[in-house]
Amino acid sequence: MGKKVEPLTESYFYILLCLANGPNHGYGIMQRTKELSAGEVKIGSGTMYGATGNMTKKGWIVESKGSTEDSDRRRMYELTEEGREILDTEIRRLRRLLADAEEVLEGK
C-alpha cells in the first residue's frame, strides 16, 4: 500500500488544478480558481504566494519560463510529475468521498 498523503487544502487543490494544463502565473491562477469555483473560492495574494513557495519546496511545482507576454514580468509556475501525482491522488480521494455520500444518501 502507498504512503498516506494528507488531504490538500482547498487553495492547494485549486493551485495544482490550475497548473494541470500548463504553466500559469499567480494572478492567472487566482482568476482561474475564481472562475472554476463560480466565485466560491478566492485565493488572496498572501495565500497564493505562501502556498506556491511551500509547494516549490515540496517539489510539486517549479518556476518556469512562460510563453505569454506577461512572463517577463510575472513569476510563472508549472506542475512537476510529483505535483501531478499529488493532484491525481487528491482527485481519487474526493471521488471516493462523493461515492460514499451518494451510497449513503441513496440508502444502500
Image: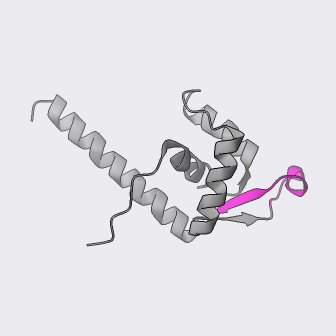
Q: Is residue 10 magenta?
A: no
Which region shows up in magenta? Answer: 66-79
Quadrant, the N terminus: bottom left
Q: How many numbered discs?
A: 0
| Left or right side of 54 for 95 | left
Viewer-nearest residue: 100 or 62: 62
Q: Quadrant of the C terminus?
A: top left
Residue 107 x %, y %: 10, 30
Instruction: Tell me where residue 97 appears, x and y as whole percent.
Output: 28, 44
Residue at 31% x, 72% y is 2
Residue 60 location, quadrant:
bottom right
Residue at x-position 66% and y-position 46%: 48
State whether residue 22 is above or below residue 41: below
Q: Which quadrant of the figure has residue 103?
A: top left
- The x, y position of residue 81, in whole percent, is 55, 70
Q: Residue at x 58, y 55 (%)?
A: 20
- Foreground pick, 105 / 59: 59
Furthest-left residue in view? 108
Q: Position of residue 66 (x, y in %)?
A: 80, 59
* 2 relative to 84 in the view: left or right: left
Position of residue 92 relative to residue 81, above or below, is above
Q: Would you place residue 12 above or below residue 61 in this image?
A: above
